[in-house]
């Protein structure tokens, strides 16, 4: 029995001697079978690697998509969590806007406001050398009325006048201030007192129309 095994092993080994690699069709049965098995194994291995490579790429894409969805979810959660705070901020802004709107006089109240500015200067002992309201400049939500003025007086009187104007219940801002000493040791101030008023209904309608036209023109230009 052992002799037969040695003979078979010797016969099998002899089949691998002197193989011509360029003519595998001439090989004995054992080398051809072994080569076929190895070739099949290589094909299976390459196919397996290709299959799992595609699977890993797909897994990577799915993980990226999962991370993107996670970030989007967290963003939505944060927005919901901040919803009450955003509503409170909106409410506060609306209250501030309403307060500012109440501080804007209408057309009929402008004369009284300009009189208050003039009175504030006279009450501080200032001399008005110029007090000239200009034409209103219409803005989207209000109108500006610049008043060119020039006053003379002592330094502290000019300072108190500016403080009084800033403290008026209506909004008036001093712009383009120019200060100069006078010959008698006093102080001269030239400035533009910018007063603001609310738009009347016709002006509001005109501004809405202009805004709509601007939006339409922008949309048309984007096409």
Image (spheres, rainbow, N blue to C red):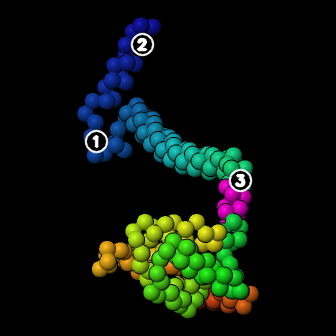
Q: Is residue 60 left or right of residue 183?
A: right
Q: Which of marks 3 and 2 is in front?
A: 3
Where, by quadrant of the figure, is residue 8 drawn? top left
Find out whether residue 95 is within the magenta segment.
Answer: yes
> Magenta segment, which residues?
89-97
Do labels 2 and 1 touch, CB within 8 Å?
no
Position of residue 85 relative to residue 117, above or below, is above
The answer to whether residue 161 shows anywhere in this view is yes
Find out whether residue 112 is within the magenta segment.
Answer: no
The N terminus - image quarter? top left
State how far apart marks 2 and 1 are (Cα): 30 Å
Q: Which residue is drawn at 29% across and 80% down?
A: 183
- Graded by Cα atoms within 10 Å as few (under 14), some (14 to 19) or many (20 or more), the crowding at tag 3 reads few
Position of residue 95 relative to residue 180, above or below, is above
* Residue closer to the observer: 68 or 60: 68
Task: Give x and y (percent) for residue 215.
Answer: 61, 84
* Residue closer to the observer: 108 or 140: 108
Where is mark 3, residue-wise? Answer: 88
Q: Which residue is drawn at 37% across and 24% down?
A: 12
Question: Quick one: label 2 or label 1, which is nearer the N terminus?
Answer: 2
* Residue closer to the observer: 45 or 175: 175
Residue sticking out furthest to the top: 2
Q: Which secondary structure lies at badge 3?
A: helix
State how far apart marks 3 and 2 are (Cα): 98 Å
Where is mark 1, residue-wise? Answer: 21
Task: Give x and y (percent) for residue 79.
Answer: 66, 51
- Graded by Cα atoms within 10 Å as few (under 14), some (14 to 19) or many (20 or more), the crowding at tag 2 reads few
Do labels 3 and 2 touch, CB within 8 Å?
no
Where, by quadrant of the figure, is residue 120 drawn? bottom right
Where is mark 2, residue-wise? Answer: 4
């Amino acid at each position: 029995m052992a002799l037969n095994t040695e003979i078979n092993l010797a016969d099998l080994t002899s089949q691998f001697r002197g193989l011509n690699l360029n003519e595998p069709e001439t090989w004995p049965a054992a080398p051809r079978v072994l080569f076929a098995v190895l070739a099949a194994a290589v094909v299976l291995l390459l196919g397996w690697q290709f299959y799992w490579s595609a699977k890993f790429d797909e897994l990577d894409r799915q993980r990226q998509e999962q991370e993107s969805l996670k970030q989007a979810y967290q963003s939505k959660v944060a927005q919901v969590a901040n919803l009450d705070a955003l509503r409170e901020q909106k409410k506060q802004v609306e209250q501030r806007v309403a307060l500012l709107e109440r501080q804007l006089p209408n057309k009929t109240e402008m004369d009284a406001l300009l009189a208050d500015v003039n009175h504030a200067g006279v009450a501080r002992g200032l001399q008005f050398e110029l007090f000239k309201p200009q034409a209103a400049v219409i803005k989207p939500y209000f109108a500006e009325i610049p008043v060119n003025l020039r006053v003379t007086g002592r330094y502290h009187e000019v300072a108190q006048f500016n403080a009084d104007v800033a403290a008026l219940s209506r909004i008036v801002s001093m712009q383009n201030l120019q200060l100069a000493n006078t010959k008698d040791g006093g102080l001269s101030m030239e400035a533009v007192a910018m007063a603001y008023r609310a738009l009347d209904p016709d002006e509001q309608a005109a501004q809405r129309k202009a805004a709509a036209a601007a939006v339409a023109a922008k949309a048309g230009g984007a096409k």
